[in-house]
Amino acid sequence: MATMIENLKTSKNKYVRISYWIGLWTLKFIQIQPYQWYIRIAILLYILGYILPVSHRAPLQAQQSVATEHQQVCVHTNLMDEVDEWKIQRSLQLVREMGAPTIVDFFPWAYVERQEGVYDWTQTDRVMNHAQNQGIQVIARTGLVPRWARAEDTTLNQISDDRFDEFADYVAAFAERYAGIADHIIIWNEPNLAFEWGFESFAPERYVRLLQTVYDSAHRANPNVTILAGALAPTIEPDGSPYALNDLIYLERMYQAGASDYFDALAVHTYGFTESHNVPPAPDQLNFRRVELIQEIIDRYDPEAEIYITESGWNDDPRWTKAVRPSQRIAYTIGAFNWAETHSNQVNTLCLWIFRFPRPTLRYPDNFTLVTSEFQLRPIYYAVQNYARGWERNDELWLPPPSAE
């Protein structure tokens, strides 16, 4: 009996310890004297201490494959921030059912290597296992710096040049571990923004040094890896701005600094904002076809390089000034996929931002989603599904139109 009581007091399970002290103080409060009742209650508390809240399980199913007629269809997900595994699984099921064979997701360095030299792949494994089970390929976006690797009182994006090697080690470990499922890795995000460097130097030449540090070790870890550079933010911010640099200027300077030797393809962000997918591009305008200006620069320096559009789309928030109506959003999005189809020799994927948020932002970004946080499918989901699966669109109304009679 004494041993059992000692086990209750010293258990590694905090619920057992809490149960013991609650039981002890309860007995003292009601002044129960008979020893047999103490024994009975202690045993009951010992058992109850192991009854812990259990999250929904999400066992892998039979191997799935994506049925699609358009391989370029892709969505950006946000699965690394999911708490419940079943939500990861359900999100990827919906991606597969929509007909998208590829996702982009963010795999932060800060999540995996919280302690220097110690990698925790638990959440990353969950995402990859379920993606593989659904027959979906992953384009992995990397970034965010662990606390131990950045200066005090800095943002999660701050990285000094002497930490490039540690970041390269993480990318190499990632490339080796997920070879075959995530053979495309984006290095950093929107490097032409000061915010993405912790408001320190965001010079193109510095970004090229980061690519150079990462490239060889990633290829040694996975000879089939495709290193994606860029993912530049579309902006017309002039040279000398403390906040950003025009993406066209930034890319040109990247190539002038020798970047073509340190990446295999270019990731591009291009949004339509309030304009249609077919509005022609112009250097001083931001619209979907700005990607064509990016392509012109690539053609001058590295004509064989492919483009992966890893963020794109339109927003249908009724209050945001850069949004469109839901019907326009659908028409422009399908038009963008048709554009990508005609440029398939140069554009590998067109990934929509964003499939679903783990929880609502309660702001305009919620209207970029295809599926709500509560797994409600939005009209844009069905439109993309019809396109990707090759299904005929049904224009019939649920109810007959009103009659003039």
Image (tube, helix red, strand yellow):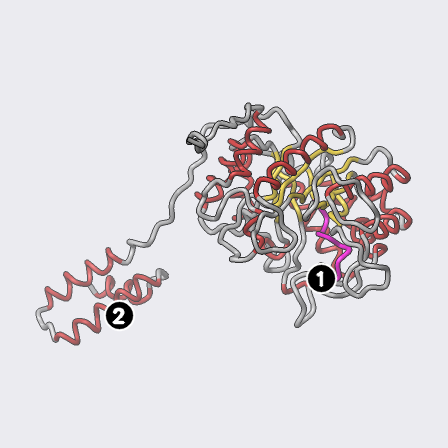
- Which residue bears the numbered disc 2? 21
Residue 133: x and y, percent?
Answer: 51, 33
Amino acid marked by disc 1: Phe
The residue located at (61%, 43%) in the rendering is: 76
Q: Quadrant of the C terminus?
A: top left
Determine the image quadrant of residue 332.
Answer: top right
Q: Mark on residue 195?
A: 1
Disc 1 and disc 2: Cα gap in Å? 49 Å
Task: Check disc 2 and give the amino acid type.
Answer: Trp
Q: Of marks 1 and 2, which one's residue comes earlier in the chain?
A: 2
Front position in the image: 227 or 288: 288
Q: Is residue 287 visible?
A: yes
- At x 75% / y 58%, what residue is drawn? 193
| Depth order, front residue of 177/39 | 177
Q: Relative to residue 216, is residue 19 drawn left or right?
A: left
Q: Which residue is at 47% across, 48% downward?
A: 373
Q: Is residue 285 above or below residue 136?
A: below
At mark 1, the secondary structure is: helix
* Left-right relation of 57 to 366: left
Instruction: Tell me the crowding category of disc 1: few under 14, some 14 to 19, or many 20 or more residues within 10 angstroms, Cα based.
Output: some
What stretch of residues is rendered in magenta? 186-197
